Amino acid sequence: MDRNTILGFVMMFIVVVGWTLWQQANYEEPPKKPKADTTQVEQNIIEEDLPPIAQLDTLGQIPLDDSLASVKQYGNAFASFSEGSEQFITIENDLLVAQISSKGGAIRNWRLKNFKKWDGVPTQLIWNERGELF
């Protein structure tokens, strides 16, 4: 190694070490949280001394019908899309045949027309019987 290579390595080492030391000096530690709040402790003690209040469990007795259950599960925006029949849309051209599900837009089948497997069956790039996304 010549003199310029050694000088280059030394300068790179100085820059890296200087940068790490400068970053540590500029780092401020976040303020520490107080361990306990006396007003919170007193509030808990006061609440424990009170007698229990009788509460009615009305939600457990009323059964939810299907529409409310779907709204609860999917939300207001998507509840209407939770029901419906699944239909398959077929797209076909000179090179391929694709079958897409109307529920979720999942690709169910993607077959190449011009290519065959070793046993003579057309090549299936995607075969998804259950309509799940990969």
Image (cartoon, rainbow, N blue to C red):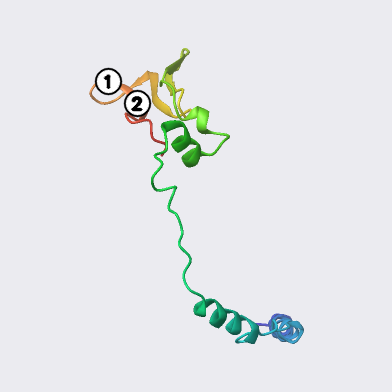
Find residue 99 and report its horizontal and vertical position in percent: 42, 20
CA neighbours of label 1 inside 10 A, class few (<14), some (14 to 19), many (20+)? few
Which residue is rendered at x = 33% and y = 31% of the image? 130
User: Comparing marks 2 and 1, which lies closer to the viewer?
Assistant: 2
Q: Secondary structure at mark 1?
A: loop
* 51 horizontally vs 18: left or right: left
Q: Residue at x 42, y 32 (%)?
A: 66
Say which residue label 2 marks: 124
Say which of 70 and 63 sits in front: 63
Instruction: List x then y, in percent, for residue 33.
Output: 65, 83
Amino acid carrying mark 1 in the image: Val
* Vertical order, 89 against 68 (above or below): above
Question: Of the numbered discs in the image, which one, if any, rests on residue 78?
Answer: none
Q: Nearer the viewer, residue 65 or 81?
A: 65
User: Marks 1 and 2: in contact by CB < 8 Å?
Assistant: yes
Secondary structure state at the residue bearing disc 2 = strand
Residue 3 sits in which quadrant?
Answer: bottom right
Q: Is residue 11 above or below residue 83?
A: below
Q: Tell me if mark 2 has few (under 14), some (14-19) or many (20+) residues whose alpha carbon lies within 10 angstroms of its own.
A: some
Taking depth in this image into account, of 4 and 94 the one nearest to the observer is 94
| Residue nearer the viewer, 76 or 50 | 50
Identify the residue under disc 1: 121
The answer to whether residue 33 shows anywhere in this view is no
Residue furthest left as drawn = 119
Q: CA distance from mark 2 to mark 1?
A: 9 Å
The residue shown at (44%, 48%) is: 58
Give x and y (percent) for residue 50.
51, 76
Residue 76: quarter of image:
top right
